[in-house]
Amino acid sequence: MKNLESFLTTWLKDYYANAKVGFKGDFYTAVSRTKFFGGALANYTLRLLDEDLKLPLTIVEIGSHDGTLISDIAEFLHAFDKFAFKDISFATLEPLDPLASLQETNFNERIGKFDKGLKVYRDIEELKALDSIFFISNELLDAFPCELVYKGKQGYIKHDDGKYSLVFDAITSDVKEKLALYKTDSGEISLSLSRFIESLCKLKSWFFLTFDYGQMEERDISLRIYKDHKVYNFLEEKDNLGEFYAKSDVTYDINFKNLETEFKSHGATPCFYHTQSKMLVEECEILEIFESFKPHLSPANILRHTNAINELIMPNLMGERFKAFGVKH
């Protein structure tokens, strides 16, 4: 038998190397909906420079996919404050070669005219020399593979006759430690996310902002598969995993209480937990930014971005389901 997290690591590595994000893919994100999501984060960056961060600053996007968000942020920062823009560097943290190349190419095509290039870091250890970092991610945390604890047992992968199936057996000691830390007895437990946070907290000074779906309170098992915008319950498909392996996304709701506890255990300070709607509207001022750019947009683009922004902030769409979590070190 193989640990579930190890199995999902290989699954997701192969999947994300070729994944299509958008309406023609398995899922779409805030980034693929409108560039004003990046504009809102650019505005929030300037706010942080007045409060928590200092120049020279490096903005590092983690989980960038094709470099769209970091490019959007850079483009809006150049429009908002050319003086601050000069002292801001842009980077991604990307271990996969195809995506690293794609991010660099797309960023340089859009932002190279402003004499800025994209630095692609392959490992978090490479960031130790930086003094001031703003980490940004969107739907990153749920992409970390996880172990699964359900009804007092831990999930494992059995591979027989070319078939992958989920079975349950004894809980390992490292997972038991996390259950004790989080004061829970079930759920998705990501050891790789814990290691990532530990590495993050060895860096000097940073602010970390992520948008992910989930909640602060504990809930039922949420591990699921996305394929062609359809959702499949992982437990219900436990004997059919081979049909989805490396060809679909696997995700789960983030338990932000556990996330908060993990960051605190490594000396970081959680700053806020907001709905995406509150973060974008009140903290990032996305509506004001959009209004200021309307005179430069065609009627068709105004309608397109209006619909997209509404989708990001409306409570019955992505506004309440997705959360913004900020933490500093």
Image: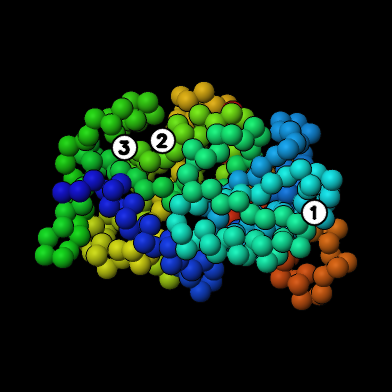
Quarter where residue 250 is shown: bottom left
Task: Count neighbours of disc 2 (C-alpha within 10 A) and say few if under 14, some if 14 to 19, many if 20 or more.
Answer: some
Can residue 288 be seen?
no
- Which residue corresponds to the image point at 66% horizontal and 49% vertical from the top-left? 90
Q: CA distance from mark 1 to mark 2?
A: 35 Å
- Residue displayed at 75% across by 36% down: 55
| Residue 16, picture quadrant | bottom left
Q: Secondary structure at mark 1?
A: helix
Residue at 45% from the left image edge and 31% from the top image edge = 198
Residue type, label 2: Ser
| Residue 205 image position (x, y, % from top left) | 62, 30
Q: Amino acid at mark 1?
A: His
Instruction: Give how far across and how far down residue 260 sits, in percent.
Output: 50, 31
* Amino acid type for the residue under numbered disc 3: Ser
Q: Which residue is mark 1?
A: 78
- Looking at the image, which residue sits at the far right? 295
Q: Which residue is mark 2?
A: 194
